Amino acid sequence: MPLSTAETYRFAAREHLERAYSLHESGEYFLSHYIAGLAVECHLRAYLRLATGEFDSRHDLRELAKEADFYGIVPRHQEEEFHTAFETLNLRWRSNHRYYSNRQFLDYMTEIKAEFRQSGDRWKNISRRLLNLAGKIIEQGEAKWNSKLERH
Amino acid sequence: MEQQIREALTQAFAGSELELDTAPDGRFSGLLIWDGFEDEDSVDRHRRVKQALAAALNDEAKNVGMLFTYTPKEMSAMRAD
């Protein structure tokens, strides 16, 4: 099996994010949500490969980001915005959602009060929100990728 | 410094659960679980934490980086299989 490198993880993250946008456009909101979160996981794994060269089998985004020193890439003046985005994404996206039925997934979102008071299509809003958060986090990582690469 | 941060947060957020680690940049990061965050969004929670840290630590509050803020209910949902 070909070994995943920092660059292949990074490329996979971009592909997954694009796929998530397409799924959203075609009304596959649950899948779009899941794949957008997976894109963030891949992006963090790219950073982790750069930072430690290791593979961490956990899917916990908070732990991955910590191990990969991902918080350190964020300029101080953007920290607040980044922190709230990452915190919200980490709450809304869990790797075990891939085992969930639509019903279970909506129950989870209800439990955490996601898009609870918003009007309109709840599925669509949930998917759009995660896409926006994932896009923001990956964009932040992309902006710092080259400088991070030079240091390794 | 860690002890001061712990005291500041546990005083301001009575009954909370706190996990602190040192990030590679030397700042403290971690997790603050408190039921008072219920019905507050992430922005409000962070503002509240920032204010508590600034009030107790003044300039030293800059030693705290990414602190995740969740309610016990959210943590329990996140930890469920």
Image (spheres, rainbow, N blue to C red):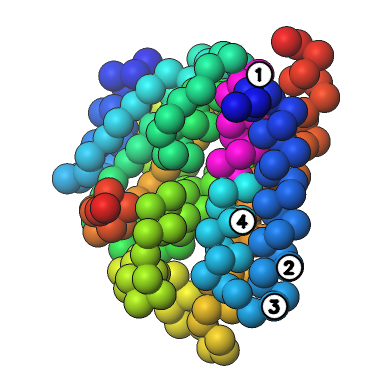
Q: Amino acid at mark 3?
A: Ser
CA–CA distance between discs 2 and 3?
6 Å
Front-most of residues A14 and B70: A14
Front-most of residues B60 and A118:
A118
Which label belongs to residue A36? 4
Q: CA distance from mark 3 to mark 4?
A: 15 Å
Residue farthest toward the bottom in the current orientation of the protein: A120
Q: Which residues are magenta?
A: A40-50
Residue located 37% across and 64% down the image: A100
Is disc 2 surrounded by few (<14), some (14 to 19) or many (20+) residues within 10 Å?
some
Q: Secondary structure at mark 2?
A: helix
Disc number lying in front (3 or 4): 3
Label at residue A50: 1
Residue position marked by numbered label 3 in the rendering? A26
Disc 4 to disc 2: CB gap under 8 Å = no
Q: Secondary structure at mark 4?
A: helix
Q: Secondary structure beneath disc 1?
A: helix
Ranked by sequence position, the earlier of labels 1 and 3 is 3
Q: Chain of mark 2?
A: A
Q: Amino acid at mark 2?
A: Ser
Give the residue at x 56% y 66%.
A31
Q: Position of residue A150 (x, y in %)?
A: 81, 14
Residue where numbered disc 2 is placed: A22
Q: CA distance from mark 4 to mark 2?
A: 11 Å
Check the image and report above or below for A129 versus A51: below
* Whether residue A30 can be seen here: yes
What's the chain of the residue with tag 3?
A
